[in-house]
Image: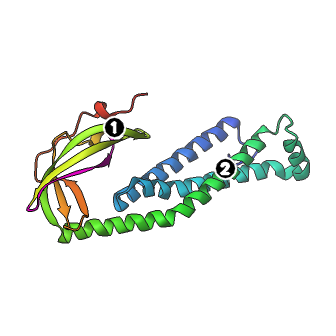
Amino acid sequence: MVSLPGDVSLVWRILALVVAGYLLLLVTLDLGEQARQRLGQRRVASLVWSAPLLAGLAVGAGLSAGAALAPDRSGTLRRTLDGLLGTEAIAVSAVVTVLAALWWITVVTRLPSALRHARRRQETIERLRRDGRRFPGTVTLGDVRVWLGRNPELDVVIAYESPAGTHVLRGRMRTSPDRVPADGSRVVVFDDLRGVVHVELDLDAEFAFEPEERYTASE
């Protein structure tokens, strides 16, 4: 939506916008994936990559609206507010600017607490790996409860044995369609014996994933 010089043809304008949008998408998706791997949580990763994307969208749309108003600011603004033909692009750019800016403010407001939560969770996982008791267990898959985009979140049951007896944990597992562990896969449960646990696939055991099509969202 950024205004380009008038001597550039419409085809080149569209091409430039497509290329710029594609590069921006690649950068933000890569940033989100790095954040997910580093922080271990998809929610905070989505906030990390959406913040610069929304900022760029708001700035781009705002520049586009401002450039269109520049030749006759008061007159063009009056015609736009009156809803006259030929001012639709300005109105759309203005609406996109406002919505993207409001969404960006919401994301930026939520980001600090999400980062603190992710950091605390990572510290807990590191503590459990270092100091917790390690017990072998198995995972039993349940039903898919919700789809987050194309990724399933399903019920799981973790069963493991400790000196205190048999334990059964019920929870939710959020993953991608190609990373759903096969039903009955072996896991490792890290338990601090104070009610805090962390579960991971047992990398020392042979494990497989469920067929991707089984957990692919229908169109």
Question: Do we see residue 4 in this rendering?
Answer: no
| Kind of element beneath mark 1 | strand
State the residue position of label 1: 144
Mark nearer the N terminus (2 vs 1): 2
Q: Nearer the viewer, residue 75 or 152?
A: 152
Query: Left or right: 180 with respect to 77?
Result: left
Most extreme residue toward the left, as rendered?
163
Q: Residue at x 26, y 45 (%)?
A: 156
- Image location (x, y in percent) of residue 10: 70, 36
- Image location (x, y in percent) of residue 6: 76, 44
Q: Residue at x 45, y 50 (%)?
A: 29
Q: Residue at x 18, y 58 (%)?
A: 189
Dominant secondary structure, magenta: strand
Label 1 is placed on what type of residue? Val
State the residue position of label 2: 99
Bounds of the magenta segment:
163-177
**In the displayed structure, would residue 50 be above or below residue 191?**
above
- Image location (x, y in percent) of residue 194: 22, 68
Q: Quarter-wise, where is residue 124 in the image?
A: bottom left
